[in-house]
Every structure is written in C-alpha cells, then in structure tokens.
Amino acid sequence: MINVDMKEKFRPQYHFSPESNWMNDPNGMVYYAGEYHLFYQHHPYGTTWGPMHWGHAVSKDLIHWDHHPIALAPDEHGDIFSGSVVVDWNDSTGFFKGASGLVAIFTHADQYPNSDRPRQRQSLAYSTDRGRTWIKYEGNPVLADESITDFRDPKVFWHEETHKWIMILAAGNHVRFYASHNLKSWEFASEFGSQSGSHAGVWECPDIFKLPVVGVENTSKWVMIVSIGNDSAYIEGSRTQYFIGQFDGISFTNENSDDTVLWLDYGRDNYAGVTWSDISHEDGRRIFIGWMSNWKYANETPTVGWRSAVTLPRELTLKETSDGVRLIQTPVAELEKIRREKRSWNQLFIEPGKHVSLDVSGEQSEIIAEFELESATEFGIKIRKSDSEETIIGYDAVNEFLFINRINSGVTEFNEYFPCLHGASLKAENNRIKLHILVDSSSVEIFANNGQVVITDLIFPDPKSTGIELYTTNKKVKLASLVIVQLASIF
C-alpha cells in the first residue's frame, strides 16, 4: 500500500486522488474476489498529461482506497489509453487454465510508421493474481481499423442472451459495437450515434448496460453513456451525455429523437465516467464514477505535486418521469462509513437581507436541505464561505433553474473558463426543492430532488473558508428541514 499526504492543499479528504502526479479517466473498474478495482489514466512523471499508464487502487467498500503500483506501462505498441476490465468467469480466453481471472481490454496508442498520424489499437492483458500483476497478451493488438483515427476506450461486457462478449468502442463521432467468443477475435456488429445526441466534441469513453425501470413491472432499458471532448467553440468544455433505448446484442436503438440530448451531469467537472463490471454478481447495483475535471483547464488546476480526483461513486437507477425514462444518481450507501457528527434544523425561516450563518464547519460535509418555495424568487445555500470567498448553490424559482456560482469560490484565475455560473432546469416536487450536497476540500457535488439533476464542480477555496450560510434575495423562504453531517477523511 502507498501512502498519501492528506495535508496537501486542496487534497480531497474522501474522494480518491492519485498518490502523486497526474490522473485522468477512470479505467478498468471491476469487482472481483471481494474487491473493487479502480484503474485510471496516469502520468507518473509529471502533473500534466503525458505518456499514459494505468494507475491502480483497490477498495473493499468503495470509500477507502489502497494505492497499488502501476498496473500497465507503455511498451512497443504504444502508450496505455483507456479501457475496461472483465472477469473471464469461464476462461473463454484460455489464460487461466480452466479457472477464472481478470482480463483488461485497453487502447494502445502510438503513431503510424513514418507519419505523425495517431494510431489507436485495442489490446489485452490478464491477471492471475487478483489484479496485482498483469501479463500482456502476446497476440496484441487484437483489433485495429486504419481508416479511423479516433478509435479508442473499449468497454466490454458479457451479453447473456447471445452468449458473446460485446465491445462498445468510441470512433470519432459515433460508437461501434464488436462481438467475440474469446476476447481475442472480434467481429464488427454495428455502429450508432453519428446523427444522434450532442457532437460538441469528439466522442470518448462509452459504456452500455441494462437497468430496470424502478416501479414499472417487467420493464428494463439499456443506458448508453458517451463522453464528449472539449471543443473551443463551446464554453462548457468536456461533458457526458447518455441515451436510453434497447440493445439486442448487435445494435442499439435510441428511444428518444436524434436531437434529444440527455446530460448525465450539469456541472463542469464530471467527465469520462463509466461503471463497474461484475458488481451484479454481488448485489445487482450499477455504480458509476467519473474524472472530476474538465479539459478546458485540467492541466492548470492549482494543486502541487498531484493533480485531479474522481467523483464519489454513485448508484445509477432508471425512473419514469413526465419527460420519459431518465437516469437517477445517488451517492453510494457506503458513504455511511465516514459520517460523523450530525446536526439538524426544522422549520427555519430565512428573511431577505438577513442571511443565516450556521455555527458548523462545512469543510468536509454532507448537507441535506429541503426548501418550500412559497413566494421567494431566489434562495439557496452558500458553502465554503468567508469574508472574501463563497460558492453559491441557488434556485431561481421564476425560471425553475438550479445553479452553482463559483465566481468567488477561491482560486479561479488560473483559467478564464473556471469562474462561472451554470446549472440546469429543475421543477419543484410538491412545491419543494430538495438538495443533497457533498462538499470536500476542492469539490462540490449536488444531487437535486433525489438525484434527478446532478451538478459536479471543482472549487479551490482557502482551507479557512468553511462557513455555511442560507440566503434568500427578496422574500422570506421556509427551510422545511436541514441536516449537516461532518465527513471523515478516508485515510
């Protein structure tokens, strides 16, 4: 196990971050032999993006993580870009002498000979010791297509109905599906997306999985997640969208119109997220984690010696709404393990011009607040507050808009796109707005109305900016209930 200095400025206290140097996309998440594995894009020799390796961490509870040595390093085929890990339960590869083991499917990235054109090909590695060491397959690469430059980020799963391994792969402006019996030989099945969803950037890091629709008997849908890279024409930078539909082992059918865009997160800092493989063998949950940054400024964030973190793991479910079936996100139940002191308030009335400061630290905290709309036009919570700093989480009741304002959140000058106000449409339910907020040393995650709308943002406040304040702009607002819980460090 590798130790991390938790006293470093801006170091997350309950979100995973690398021991040192650079990280980006989470990779290869798999559950096996009682352990959750998190691999990630890692540059071990610098704090900006560089030659990609797979970093590695292991957890038994999704909250506390042990750092392990680098799992995969560049070789004669190139750097190690994103990919996935599966449990080969029936030894379809023949790597495990009839037993089960872990197989990584990842992108090897280099350049075509005598050219500056990028080359991206899919390769395998396997582990016979629960992910501690990895052997690269001697037949690498196993899948290539010279006609496609952006050809990366394979996510693989076993499709029970067709008894085949399925790979979903990002291919520039769309995704492609391939099928295999042994993870070594792949056949093209179909493609999706060149005319669907958002194309405000190259498509990356796809995932696809099946979920039941909560409360609707005998109804399940397939969810496809696709991240889109930063494009200078769009101020939002890198983001993640999703599609709802059906998958038959060959092709995906989108049940929404091609111009419908469903955002997984309305913040600026949740990208390249995918879900864990093989948790279904344990408890059936579908758990997601994302890279907590944005390519607009990822190489410039104001940390020293390390850079980037991941979101809190989230359970994904599907819910029927007035707009159709939509993805719901909630923090994993294992968060209970780090909850400490709790304070509660009921029936608080906040008067305009008389902001209510709470006598509690908000440095590492979980805040659950339920507001009654009444006649106030804007109200909310200010976190990580001091005389000069604050991050505002507000609700514009006139426009039914939930927002975060990090313009005065702390260190912001490192990039022109960082200080900003943004948010998402959100309708009240039974005349109430419920906010579930998770605050860490350099991040805030907002789950609104039980996870219907999610906003994830980085912030870089002074460690002494720990205040929490309630506000309303013009008329009295009623806070029906408020709970603030202190969260412990995971190390």
Image (cartoon, helix red, strand yellow):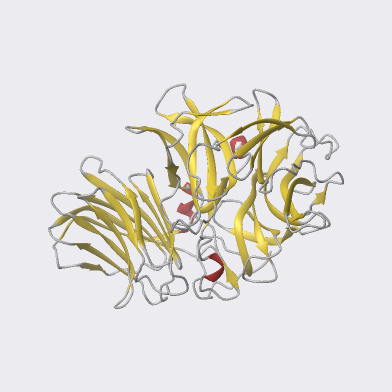
**In this picture, residue 437 sits left or right of residue 380:** right
Quadrant placement of the C terminus: bottom right
Residue 316 picture location, percent across and down? 48, 41
Q: Tell me: residue 420, above or below residue 283.
A: below
Residue at far front of view: 115
Q: Tell me: residue 384, above or below residue 452.
A: below
Q: Nearer the viewer, residue 117 or 241?
A: 117
Q: Tell me: residue 262, above or below residue 118.
A: above
**In this picture, residue 405 sits left or right of residue 71:** left
The number of discs equals 0
Residue displayed at 45% across by 56% down: 234
Q: Nearer the viewer, residue 90 or 473?
A: 473
Q: Nearer the viewer, residue 382 or 226?
A: 226
Residue displayed at 49% across by 27% down: 220
**In this picture, residue 243 sits left or right of residue 376:** right
Residue displayed at 34% across by 59% down: 404
Q: Name the image quarter holding residue 392.
A: bottom left
Residue 389 picture location, percent across and down? 33, 74
Q: Tell me: residue 105, above or below residue 219.
A: below
Q: Nearer the viewer, residue 41 or 116?
A: 116
Residue 367 picture location, percent across and down? 34, 57
Determine if residue 286 is in view: no
Determine if residue 12 is in view: yes
Residue 342 picture location, percent across and down? 35, 59
Quadrant placement of the N terminus: bottom right
